[in-house]
Image (tube, coloured by chain):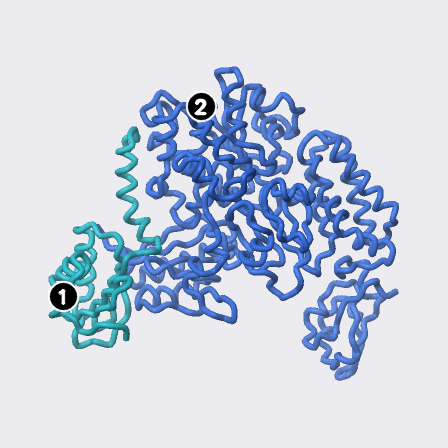
Amino acid sequence: MHLTTNTILICAGGACISSGEESVKEALERKIKEYNLQDAIEIVETGCMGACSLGPIMVIYPEGIYYQKLTPEAAEKIVEEHLLKGRVVEEYLYQGDKDKLIPQPQKEIPFFSRQVKIATRNLGVIDPLNIEEYIARDGYFALHKALKEMTPEEVIKVIKDSGLRGRGGAGFPTGLKWEFARKSPGDEKYMICNADEGDPGAFMDRSILEGDPHTIIEAMTIAAYAIGANKGFVYVRAEYPIAIERLSAALNQAREYGFLGENILGTDFSFDIEIRIGAGAFVCGEETALINSIEGERGQPRVKPPYPAQKGLWNKPSNINNVETLACVPPIIINGPEWFRQWGTEKSPGTKVFALAGKVKNTGLVEVPMGITLRELIYEIGGGSPTGKKIKAVQTGGPSGGVIPEEYFDTPVDYESLNNLGAIVGSGGMIVLDEDDCMVDVAKFFLEFSVDESCGKCTPCREGNKIMYEILDKITRGEGTEEDIELLEKLGNTIKDSSLCGLGQTAPNPVLSTLRYYKEEYLAHVRDKKCPAKKCRDLISYVIDPEKCVGCTACARVCPVNCINGEVRKVHEIDQSQCIKCGSCIEVCRFGAISKVSPAIE
Amino acid sequence: MPKIKSLEDLMKIKENTLKNVKMRELGKRGKIIVAMGTCGIAAGAKETLNAIVEALNESNIDDIAVVQSGCMGLCEVEPTVKVEIEGETPVVYGHVNPENAKKIVKKHILAGELVGELIVKQGKE
C-alpha cells in the first residue's frame, strides 16, 4: 500500500468553482508533482462545504486545517510550507472576531459547529464520483435494509413515523405521499425526483446532487420499492450541468454495483432511473407542470385532483419528491424515525438546509434543526451584519415567500410558525435585509421574477401579477397614489385565490407581506415621495456636504456625465438637473462628504 | 465488478474504503510526526516514514495520523520522530531507523510503553 500522509479535500461546489477552484487545484497538483509528493498526498474534490463566501476552500487532513479564499499562489505556498515543511500558512486561515486566526473553524465557529448535517451529511466529506466512499459512509446500507428486511408497508410506516415533510416548499408529509402512491391501483408506477430548483438564491438541491449524487439514487430506489415503481426520473434543469454530469456518472456506477437494474441486491425488485433535463422554467418545479414537461408537453400545471399519486406521469400513479427530502430518507431508514425526531419540533421534525444570503457575514448553505429561531440563524450562525448596519428583516422562501421583521426574530423556524407570519419556509432561501434595503423595491424584485416565470395559463397570474408589478414600479418612481396601495392588496388576494398552481397562489406574497409589516414605507413613497432606505433612484438625490468637502476632485473625475463642478481645494457641487444618480461619486469620496437624501431635490 | 448482493459485500467495501475516509475525520487518538527537513531526509527519514506507515497498517491502527514536519532542530540525532497522543506528554525519539520505528509503533502506540533508550526529550518545547 502506498503511503498517504495528507489528504486534501477541496470544495468543488458551484460557488467555489466559479471563484477559481479549478486553477487552485491545478496549482496544487503542479507543485505537489514538482516536489514529488504525488504518492503521499491525495487530493479529493468534494461537494459544497457550505461556507460559500469563503471560497475557494480546502481542508488538509489529518490536521483538519481549513484554508479559505485561495488563489493559485496560495496553493503553491501551502504545498511548500504546510505539506512539505509542516507549517501552517496563517494568511489563508479563517479569521474570527478581532482578527483572531482560527485554523479549525469547523470545530469552533457557530456557522459550522451549530449545524446538524443529515441531508448534507456527505457534502464536503466524500468524493462524489467515488461510490465506495459513499458506501464507506453507510451508503446503500439503507437500501439493503429496506429491500431485504422490510416490506414496502414497513418502509412507508418508518417514513410516516419520522414526520419527514417535503423540503421543496409545501411541507406535505412524505410518508403520506408514498402511501397514496402505494395504495393507488395500477401495476405501472413512477418515482420522480424533483430537482428543478428555481428559487433565486436557493441552491441546496444542486449542492446535494453535485456533492452526494448516490444518496438521491439510493433514496429513489427505496421510495420506488415502497410505492411499487420500476422506473424513475430525475427532472433537473439544464442550468445545472455539473449536477447532471455527476449524477450520470453515479447512475452508471450504481448500475455496475447492482444497486440499479434487474434484481437489485439479488432480490426480485428491479428499478432504473433516467435523467430528464428541463429548460429551467420556474413553473416546472410545480409537480404537475413537471410531469407535463417529462411527457414532452408544455410546462403548464394540471388541475388537481386528480393528484399525481392517482394520475401522474402518463396518467399512471406517480410519486414526486424533492432532492433534499430524498436525501433525508436513507439515514431515517438506517436509524429509525425516533432518531430523526430528536431534532426539530413536533410538527416539523428533523433539519432543514437554508441558503443564507444578503446582509449577513457568513453566507452559504447551512443545515440546522427545525425550530431554531431566526435570531440564532441570522446572528449566531450567520454572524450578523458584516457592516454593522442594523438588520431590518429577513426574506424567506424566495418569490413565494415573504418578509419577517426584526421584532419577530425569536420565532422558531418551522412550517407553521413562518406561515402565521405571512412568510414560508419554502425551499429554504433566506435573504437578510438591512436599513439600506427598500421594502417596495424588494417586493418588486421578487414579483418581476414571478411575472417572467408565469406560464400564462391562468389569467389572474398572467395579467394580475403584471399589473401589480406596474403599480410597484409606479410607486418606486414616486408616481403612486394611496388608491394604488389598496388596489395592490385587493389584486394580491384575488390572484392568490384564483390561480391554479403554487406559482400564482404565492406570487403576490412578497407584496402582501411587505404591505403587512412595512405599509409606512409604501406610504412614504406615495405621500412624501420619499424612499426611507434611500434606494429608489427617482426619489433620491446625491448631495455634497460643504463642511466636509476638501475639493480633492475625485468625484468630479469619476462622474460619467460631468455634472460635478468645482475647482481644486474648493467645495464641489452636484448639478441635480444633470445627475443620473449612478452613485460613483459616493464610492470614491474618501472624506464622507457625499450622501443621499430623500425626497429628491428638484 | 461483480454485482453486490449481500450485506457482507457492502461491509467489505465499507471497511476497505473507511481507512481512507477516516483519515479525513478529526478526533484521532494522536499522531506521529516525522521530521522531514533536509537533515532528516539525509539521515533516512523517508525510510523511517515508510516503516511507520507499514507498521501501522500491519497492526491495523487507523486512529493515529502520520504527519511530516520540518526540522525540529535536533539534527545530530536525526531521524527524529515525535509521538503525540491525546492527553499524554509528547515524546521525541531520536535515531529512529526503520527498525526503531517499528519498535516505537509496537511499544508506544500499541502497548502504551515508552521506548526509553530512544527518548531525546519529553514534554512541550
Quadrant for residue B39, please give it.
Answer: bottom left
Q: Is residue A383 left or right of residue A261?
A: right
Q: Is residue A108 left or right of residue A500?
A: left
Residue A166 placement (x, y as % from top left): 55, 35
Q: Are marks 2 and 1 on the same chain?
A: no
**Does A297 sit above or below residue B12?**
above
As rendered, which of A468 and A564 lies closer to the eye? A468
Residue that protrudes farthest toward the bottom in the picture? A569
Q: Is residue A219 left or right of residue A404?
A: left
Residue drawn at the location 46% of the way across and 64% of the way down? A94
Residue drawn at the location 71% of the way across and 74% of the way down? A592
- Residue highlighted by disc 1: B115
Quadrant for residue A196, please give it.
Answer: top right
Chain B colour in the picture: cyan
Q: Is residue A135 among what the camera can see?
A: yes
Residue A482 placement (x, y as % from top left): 87, 48
As rendered, which of A324 and B89 lies closer to the eye? B89
Residue A44 placement (x, y as % from top left): 37, 51
- Residue highlighted by disc 2: A153
Q: Which chain is blue?
A: A
Query: What whole-number distance in Å separates the C-alpha atoms at marks 2 and 1?
Result: 60 Å
Residue drawn at the location 27% of the way across and 60% of the way down? B30
User: Counting other residues with Cα less than 10 Å from the Cα at mark 1, is it few (<14), some (14-19), or many (20 or more)?
Assistant: some
| Chain label for disc 2 | A
Which label is found at residue B61?
none
Dot 2 and dot 1 residues touching (CB under 8 Å): no
Q: What count of labels does the image hold?
A: 2
Amino acid beneath label 1: Val
| Chain label for disc 1 | B
Q: Is residue A448 among what the camera can see?
A: no
Amino acid beneath label 2: Glu
